Image: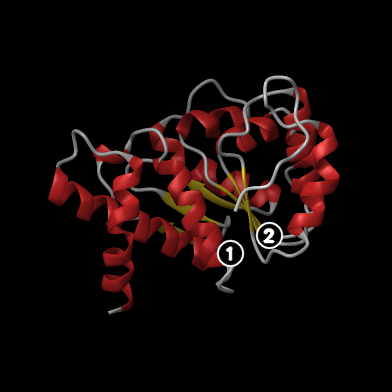
Amino acid sequence: MTVPLACDDQGRLAQAAHRRIVELAAKCTSIGCGPGMQLTEDVDYLVGRLFVEMAQPMVVDADGLNALAEQPDLFSRHAGPRIVTPHPGEFARLVGIERLNPAEREGRARDLAIRGGLIVVLKGHKTIVTDGHDLYINTTGNPGMATGGCGDVLTGIITALLGQSLSPFAAAQLGVYVHGLAGDLAAAALGQTSLIASDLLRYLPEAFKRVSG
């Protein structure tokens, strides 16, 4: 389930990978972009082109967000639905501020969503999901989830839900809820202190079972 792509001498994606990525994505119903990509000019180029060109719904996270922060003129230039999932630091870079004031989370998230025609998932305590008009505040999740890789799990969940034909807002809303619920189930069984991202994967089936039940 992995594919070799053109890269530089340090294993980072090169601009030449664009054509192969487009060929592969043509078979896909949804796209996740960003985790593990690293930061280079070539990655900025690739993320920018894919963000603008791909017609499928796309979830952008991690280094994909950092690449977009270097190209804010692209926010509203996309061929399909876009969901961005920044934590507060990534959000601050996206909107060009030094630090996000917690009291301004809802307003800032709405503004970015409207400006870019995006679904914004602003992660953190009581994660916000908004398209600029509707706004959902999540009630699941715990501090033990503030560890490397948990955001990547969320990207995968939302991308998978998009692939099941949920609307972008519904996919983001349900993805955030189930992700947090899996984290809560994991924390109840294992404790918050040593929680890691793979623990969420172990408890995802039970989280989905509880939602669907």
Q: Are marks 2 and 1 in contact (CB under 8 Å)?
A: yes
With 5 as the anchor, is 1 left or right in this view? left
Could you tell me which residue is drawn at 30 percent across and 39 percent down? 196
Could you tell me which residue is drawn at 36 percent across and 59 percent down? 177
Task: Give the answer, above or below, for where 199 lies relative to 177.
Answer: above
Q: Secondary structure at mark 1?
A: helix
Look at the image and tell me whether residue 143 can be seen: yes
* Residue that badge 1 annotates: 168
Q: Earlier in the sequence, mark 2 or mark 1?
A: 2
Q: Residue 143 appears at what percent x and percent y?
A: 25, 38
Could you tell me which residue is drawn at 73 percent across and 20 percent down? 9
Q: Which mark is residue 81?
A: 2
With 138 as the anchor, is 142 left or right in this view? left
Q: Check the picture and name the quadrant holding the C terminus.
A: bottom left
- Could you tell me how far apart the alpha carbons at marks 2 and 1 are, in whole angstroms? 7 Å
User: Which residue is situated farthest in the bottom direction here?
Assistant: 213
Disc 1 residue type? Pro
Q: Secondary structure at mark 2?
A: loop
Closer-to-camera residue (72/186)? 186
Q: Residue 208 appears at what percent x and percent y?
A: 33, 68
